[in-house]
Amino acid sequence: MRAFRAATIGATVLALAAAGTVALAAPASAAPCGNPGTSGSSGMPGFGTGSTGGPGGQSGRGPQGPLPRFSGATTKTVSWVTGPRSENNTLDRFGISGTDLGISWKNAQGQTLMAYGDTFGNCDVPGQEWRFNVLLRSSDNDLANGITVPDAQPGNITSGSVVSADRPNFARQLIEAIGLDFVEVTKIPTAAISIGDKQYINFMSVRKWGDAGRWDTNYSAIAESGDNGQTWETKLDTIRVNAPVTVPTIQQVQADNDKFQMNAYAKGKPGDPYIYQYGTPNGRFGSAHLARVKPESFLNLAAYEYYTTDAADPWKQELGNLKPVLAAPVSEMSASWNEYLGKYIVLYGTSDLGGGTVIRTADKPEGPFGPPTTLYNSLQLPGVYAPFIHPSSAGKDLYFTASSWGSYNVMLLRTDLSKVRTN
């Protein structure tokens, strides 16, 4: 019965996509390999495509430039994590000339896993070795000089990446997608977490890229791995269809699921048994809402509770009357309990004029959150987006990764939490 129901949900998703129930936006071009027209992540408001000139950028090695040197009141750049200019030399070692995101989390053994979005390799070959998503691993907990990724080894589930024996220097794709415009262009990770010996990635199925900062999704869903990220299985019962439709008996088809197309996970502080899921709509201009679930029920949407407008009893299992915990615009956020501050922290991009990346703190996952501290604005670090907290941060040093649109690669930054405003 469960298998039949999951198959039915999957069919429903495809039918909704084919019927065009998700609104489409005008197309936009991305140029992570330096040649306009390449499919990939949607552009940043106020920035160009990141093109560095003719096809293939630097002889097939992509458009990555020097690390932007920035040292602000709270935050400074540390190093490139990915790309041919990084210490990891991810092009020659993993076939990665360009990528973004780098969502990081710890497994049960303390190793850090990092999930990346649309990824390119040799820019001079047909298709530019595009993969929908890839994974890197690291056991480096001293981040002062960057993140070190070890070599990949075929079949070794703790090595630097997932590779095959026939291509030991080429990171394999994790989660398959259709790869067809207006149906499913790609699947991109937006959050990840470890529960016991299982790894989980929450991803969005992108239907179509639109104008800068805007795109449309078919759904979000959770993929599970029982072998430390070597292989992944999408759990169909966790699909959240992005459509203005509610079917009372099916959790996967609820109108408010549009608020959880992109996500961030945070484990509760010591003594709090919940996993918290912050959700935003597709694109970079929505508000953030909040759900919570016990770890043992993580894959059961019916067990989730949602933060609502009911002041007397705000947590409800039913979707509806959801209360935003962060006002728009909230873009590509991450969240965690921080021992140094004794507070929950959130990092996210702001897409309004002069926006950049901000940090905010709260005593409870639902807030209220204190005033934002701007870590950098769009003039200081143009086109830098997607701030994802690194789990090896300790003390007053908060490390996080962010993506550079112009270089189409991921960097590491450090924030001094003693200089951050708290509520």
Image (spheres, rainbow, N blue to C red):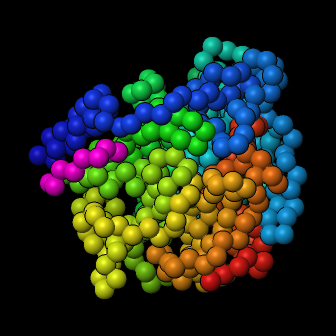
Specify the farthest residue to the front: 353
Q: Is residue 357 left or right of residue 39?
A: right
What's drawn in magenta, residue-wise? Answer: 242-249
Specify the farthest residue to the top: 126
Residue shown at 42%/40% (left/top)?
217
Residue shown at 22%/41% (left/top)?
9
Judging depth in this view, the residue of 298 and 243 nearest the camera is 243
Q: Is residue 338 left or right of residue 379?
A: left
- Please identify the quadrant where the C terminus is shown: bottom right
Question: Is 107 in the magenta?
Answer: no
Specify the farthest residue to the left: 1
Q: Is residue 214 left or right of residue 324?
A: right
Residue 157: % across, % down: 54, 45
Residue 376: % across, % down: 77, 60
Residue shown at 70%/32% (left/top)?
49
Residue shown at 47%/47% (left/top)?
282
